[in-house]
Amino acid sequence: MNQRMRLKDSWATILILVVLLVAFLIETFTGGSENNYVLLKMGAMSNYAIAAGGQWWRLFTAQFLHIGILHLVSNAVIFYYMGQYLEPMMGHLRFLFVYLLAGVGGNLFSFAFGDDRAISAGASTAIFGLFGAMVAIGLRNRANPMISYLGRQAFWLALINIALDIFDPGIDLQGHLGGLISGFLLAIVMGDKMVQKYSVKWRVLAGAVLLLYIVLTVRMGMVINF
């Protein structure tokens, strides 16, 4: 019964994990997850392809692809852990929307400030969005010791990972930063189903900042990469 309740409370998490696994299997059986041709064909991030080819869908599809089995496993473990806390707290659809939209937001930041020659992929942009969402919820619910603690943990985990990213040229640091920012703003705008929401004033402000973020990153990306 407890297992059934757990699955019911986190079906969006399980769904995304299944999609990530299926995408990885398709990569593997069509040439390999580390094959640049396969990655580009399946929708990995390529700033030039977006700016010059108009392939904006890559901002969305790249978050479902992974480069190597360790990349997939590490992201899947972190995502599963975050989903067990955030999905019941936010509600299934809010959690799903924040995950997917933060992934796009992270890739937008990478489009604006990343290497135009690099090919990138992975769920980490969306996962950093979940870190940002947990921080936003923790700040709004500081009177709740458990939620406040989870918010602080998410903040420090994101900060440590970003610090490590600086020393690894193969990591899309810009995508991680963009995901963190996007998830934070999206959580304020969308709220949650169990705990206190931000006021209308803060939600409107966050929405305006998010809109400005989209406009600026698209504009910057087109100028730099075209």
Image: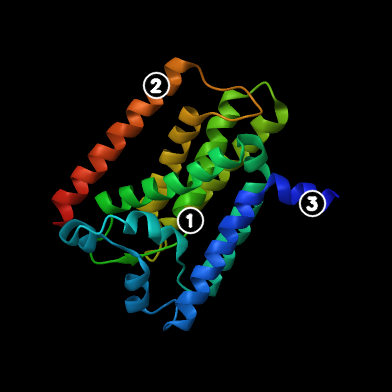
* Mark closest to the chain's N terminus, 2 or 1: 1
Label 1, on which residue?
124
* Mark closest to the chain's N terminus, 3 or 2: 3
**Amino acid type, residue under disc 1 in the picture:** Ser
Could you tell whether 73 is left or right of 55 in the image? right
- Residue that sits furthest to the right in the current view: 1
Question: Image quadrant for the C terminus?
Answer: bottom left
Q: Position of residue 84 (x, y in %)?
A: 68, 47
**Amino acid type, residue under disc 3 in the picture:** Arg
Could you tell whether 89 is left or right of 116 in the image? right
Closer to the eye: label 3 or 1? 3
Q: Position of residue 99 (x, y in %)?
A: 50, 46
Q: Which mark is residue 2?
A: none
Q: Which mark is residue 4?
A: 3
Q: Which mark is residue 204?
A: 2
Q: Are marks 2 and 1 in contact (CB under 8 Å)?
A: no
Closer to the eye: label 2 or 1? 2
Numbered disc 1: secondary structure: helix
Q: Position of residue 59 (x, y in %)?
A: 34, 54
Nearer-the-camera pick, 224 or 39: 39
Determine the residue positioned at 27% across, 53% down: 111
Distance between mark 3 and mark 1 Cα atoms? 28 Å
- Tag 2: Cα neighbours inside 10 Å, few (<14), some, or many (≥20)? some
**Amino acid type, residue under disc 2 in the picture:** Val
- Tag 3: Cα neighbours inside 10 Å, few (<14), some, or many (≥20)? few
Q: Are marks 3 and 2 in contact (CB under 8 Å)?
A: no
Q: Are marks 3 and 1 in contact (CB under 8 Å)?
A: no
Nearer-the-camera pick, 38 or 185: 38
Q: Quadrant of residue 60?
A: bottom left
